[in-house]
């Protein structure tokens, strides 16, 4: 299997894992909506995010941009309303962005390394 094929498989597994995590979070959040009352905006955004995540399993199966877009959309629908109501939550989110940034940098470096290895073997 080529280096690009391995990278595509990693990306595919990672994006579907994120979709499953978001689906679980949304189902739990909506399941507890009757116990802890959600503001109407949060409830509407959670239902929209749930619909998008469920649809992404079908519509995103061959399209990376759809999967990544739905992950970003669903994450923002959960984070933005909370940060607007309680801005102090922005600090831990920014703190969590540091390891996420390092992870993204490492994945980007690995993808470029895979491309360089493949190019050097084809030009030899």
Image: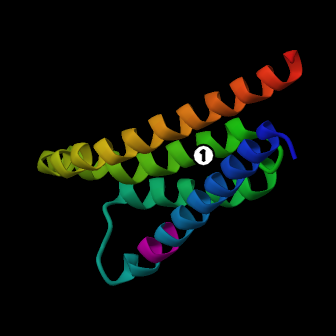
Residue 23 located left or right of residue 87: right
Q: Which residue in the structure is indicated by mark 1? A: 70
Residue 102 counted in the magenta span: no
What colour-coding does the image apply?
rainbow
Tell me where residue 52 appears, x and y as whole percent. Answer: 63, 52
Tell me where residue 42 appears, x and y as whole percent. Answer: 37, 57
In the image, farthest residue toward the bottom: 35
Q: Which residue is at 33% across, 84% downward?
A: 35
**Within 10 Å of the Cα at label 1, are there few (<14), some (14-19), or many (20+) other Cα atoms?**
many
Tell me where residue 78 appears, x and y as whole percent. Answer: 39, 54
- Total marks in image: 1
Residue 10 located left or right of residue 94: right
Name the quarter where the C terminus is drawn.
Answer: top right
Q: Which residue is at 55% across, 54% downward?
A: 48
Nearest to the observer: residue 66 or residue 82: 66
Residue 3 located left or right of residue 23: right
Dominant secondary structure of the residues highlighted in magenta in the image? helix
SS at mark 1 in the image: helix
Which quarter of the figure has residue 20? bottom right
Q: Which residues are magenta?
A: 26-30
Nearest to the observer: residue 36 or residue 119: 119
Residue 106 located left or right of residue 98: right
Q: Which residue is at 24% across, 42% downward?
A: 94
Q: Which residue is at 38% across, 40% downward?
A: 102
In the image, farthest residue toward the front: 124
Nearest to the observer: residue 72 or residue 42: 72
Residue 29 counted in the magenta span: yes
In the image, farthest residue toward the left: 88
Tell me where residue 116 appears, x and y as whole percent. Answer: 70, 24
């Amino acid at each position: 299997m080529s280096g690009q094929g391995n990278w595509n498989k990693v990306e595919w597994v990672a994006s579907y894992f994120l979709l499953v995590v978001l689906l679980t979070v949304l189902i739990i959040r909506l399941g507890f909506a009757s116990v802890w009352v959600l503001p109407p905006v949060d409830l509407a955004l959670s239902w929209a995010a749930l619909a998008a995540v469920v649809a992404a399993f079908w519509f995103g199966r061959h399209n990376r941009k759809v999967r990544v877009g739905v992950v970003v959309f669903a994450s923002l629908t959960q984070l933005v309303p909370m940060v607007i109501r309680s801005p102090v939550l922005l600090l831990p989110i920014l703190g969590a962005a540091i390891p996420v940034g390092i992870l993204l940098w490492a994945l980007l470096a690995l993808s470029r390394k895979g491309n360089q290895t493949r190019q050097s073997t084809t030009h030899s």
